[in-house]
Image (spheres, grey):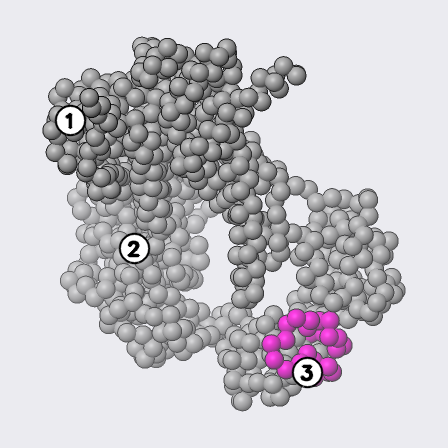
Amino acid sequence: MRHWWRTLRPAARIARRDAVRSKGRTALVAAMIGLPVLGGVGGAVLAQSSMESPEHAARAALGGAQAVIDDYGTGPVRQDPVGQRVDVLSQWTQRPSPTEQGRVIADVVGGTVVRTDQRVVVLGAHGRELVHATTIRSADRASPVLAAGQVVRGSAPSGTGQILLAVDEADELGVDVGDRVTARAESGPASTLTVTGIGNHGSLAVGFLADGFANGTTWSVVGSTPVTWAEVEALNEHGLRVVSRAVLDHPPSFGISVAAPRLDGAVIGLFGAAAVMGVLEAVLIVGPAFAVGARRVERLLALVAACGGDQGTMRSVVVLTGLITGLAASLVGAVVGLVGAVLVRGVLVARGSTAFPELRVPWLLCVAFVVVGAVVATAASWLPARRATRMDVVAALGGRRVEARPHPKVPLVGIGLVVGGLVAAVVGALQTTPALLVAGPVAIQVGVVVAAGGLVTLVGRLAPRAGVAARIAMRDAARQRGRTAPAIAAVIAAVAGIVAGAVYAQSSGAAEQAIYRPSGAVGTVMVAYSPTDPFGNPLPDSPQPDSTAVERALRGALPVGSSAILRTAVPADADGAFLVPAPRPALGCPAMEKVLVDPQQAGGRCYLYGDRMPSTVSFQAPGQTYLPTAIVDDGSAAEALEGGDVALGEAVAKGTVLVTRPDAIWPDGTVHLYAVAERDVVGLQPTAELVAPARLVAGLGQFEVLVNEADATALGMSAVEAGVVASTTRMPTDDEQKAAETALARQAVVGVEPGYHGSTPVVLLILVAGAVVVGLGATALAMALAAAEFRPDLATLGAIGAGPRTRRRVAAAQAGVVVVVGVGLGAVTGLLLGGVLVLALHQTGSRLVPVLHLVVPWPALAAIVVGVPVLAMGGAYVLTRSRLPMARRVVG
């Protein structure tokens, strides 16, 4: 141990001095290590602070009370001290009433008990009521504890007949402190309450409907008498859950604990693979810095060897440089990230944000970030350290650069890893084996890294066929493989991951869009009749709204172009028939009863209804509460659904049937419509058939079929008014839509088709930006670290009369070697990995499988493959000084 420390001390001293001497390189490495640690620690603190702990949530629920009690509603229970986990011990044969439970609580605890019920009421003022009911809290007695921290202006209720009104409801009713409001429950007379204050956490009334029906009841224990754990257990025996301040302050050492969530092994494996690949990427990006650092201290290392230092000492100098730099950068980054997260949360909380309820610092995760940062720097310096121990000491002392010859079989090993990883990934995707699916991409990335040196050698062999600047750059890259290969490998790995993610996002997004069911063209307004009372209860015996009045209300609130009444097809007799198009014979679908009974038959091709959900409102006619709706139309509804397509309306009037699926159109351009009724438990049998010319219209959305009245009658169907459809001249605003909803409240449901808005474009933009940043960063790093080593070559160019622009062209060519090779191979690798991911999604049984295909995001791919090299080479050309350096001359 003492010998090891004596050997390590001089190496550490040399490493520290080298880090201090090379301030630019040290700062660059420190930034690459420290910034991710800073972001990781800051993000972890903010993410943890956004998730409220059970203890904090319990204390917030207590407010100023000693305990809050609620009826679990099942039977005797056993709970943890926080009240988050509750185990039911047995079931009630007859559930006690809230009044009986209140007596039990009063007998067990020693403080004052305040009962609070959740009431659904309709509030009113100035002779009018709100359109919809709202939920308020109703306490049996006044207590300032119930409204602690909730009063915006005014005061909390202090007696019976008073209410603390919510801000939104006060604004909608146009009332303020001192005004009077009415509260009407679903049954019983309305009550008049005086507004004593405006609150920000719902409405609180005192003495209102204390004996009426409640949606939920809680009891608050106020006063100074604590509720002990023994009293909590006594209340648990009566089916009551308790959150007690005294128990939170002094939790018992027994009871049940909150079970930590269990993660699936596949999830752990995927996260582990992502972490390993992230660390590998960081090592690849940082590696060139230590490679060039080791080259710059070759003479120093040679002196160490000449003075008797062994290979271990020389290796320790380089490795300890990485360890010291990485550890210092990680510590500084962690401290800055922690302080920054605390400041950000403090500012947001001071401005009224509730996104971060409490400051929670994940110390273990912060330590892990510091350790990972140090490990990344140490690992990045390991290969340069090993290479430094194999240098020619005599050549290094003489100032000559000697590059070790690469082993010819190393690239073959890399190619083998790539092929093996690809096979493993495909097998893992087909057999849904998480281990292979994780190991495959990792092996591919490692294989690309191992083969990067061979790629650089191949680039050097192509140099004679290039121009002067490109030839110099390519030969320099081949000669300095220790600097070039890691940079190329970093770009390959990063671009491969980004392209794979882009392919997966585009493919899944295209599948999501394929199953999206619009209710019509973008901006189409759908009104489905649904008469209800203010409490949301349907009124089946209420007459249908007047369609003319509905259309008039829509035109008064929205920019309506054309409108039409929607009529749904319903059975003309009592058989309960519905319409469904038959799939074309070429699909090889079985008989109709099998088609309708087995949705998975023939890979989903034969399932012609119910596989997609409507995007806005649902139209429910008698006998059709669970199936897509068939519309009976004279052409006006089709015109409105398609945004004013007059020709389409005329085609419907002449007998053309509109369908939404290409599977329903037969080779001769017709559709075979069946009227199907449920006869028995065996299957669904068709009762009538109609063959008519068909037209595919995606804008029908949730409506599977649109037929004219003559065809509906031939199939034994009739039509009833179910709503109104209207096209708009522009997309309605939120205020206009709210005005339409208010005008038709309690009569109908109003929806506006927004169109498909997936997250794929945003994801692709982020991925392209990431590729640009990584590509430019790796290239800039390789260029910055190559500048010093390339000075003799530039001096030679100046001596033979090269022009000032030559240096810029050479710099651009050097950048091009790194980024063109890296981005090109990375894009190809990413396409393969993206295909594997899509193939894996096919095996999951996802709802996207029937429409999931490999879709390449060509614009994003072009932006990466073309944009990144152009930006890198252009930046190198513009930012490089054109003046060539001159070598020192000896005179005399």
Q: N-terminal of the two: label 2 or label 1?
A: 2
**Residue at x 56% of width, y 31% of height:** 265
> In the figure, 19 relative to 733: above or below?
above
Q: Report crowding for label 1: few under 14, some 14 to 19, many 20 or more residues within 10 A (C-alpha).
A: few
Residue 183 — which label? none
Tell me residue 795's x, y (percent). Answer: 21, 27
Magenta segment includes 161: yes
Q: Front-most of 489 and 499?
A: 489
The residue singled out by tag 2 in the image is 705
**Residue at x 75% of width, y 70% of height:** 115
What residue type is disc 3 on? Answer: Gln
Q: Front-most of 377 and 52?
A: 377
Q: Report crowding for label 3: few under 14, some 14 to 19, many 20 or more residues within 10 A (C-alpha).
A: many
Q: Nearer the viewer, mark 2 or mark 1?
A: 1
Q: Is residue 48 left or right of residue 64?
A: left
> Can residue 807 be seen from the camera position used here?
yes
The residue singled out by tag 3 in the image is 162
What residue type is disc 1 on? Answer: Ala
Mark 2 secondary-structure assignment: strand
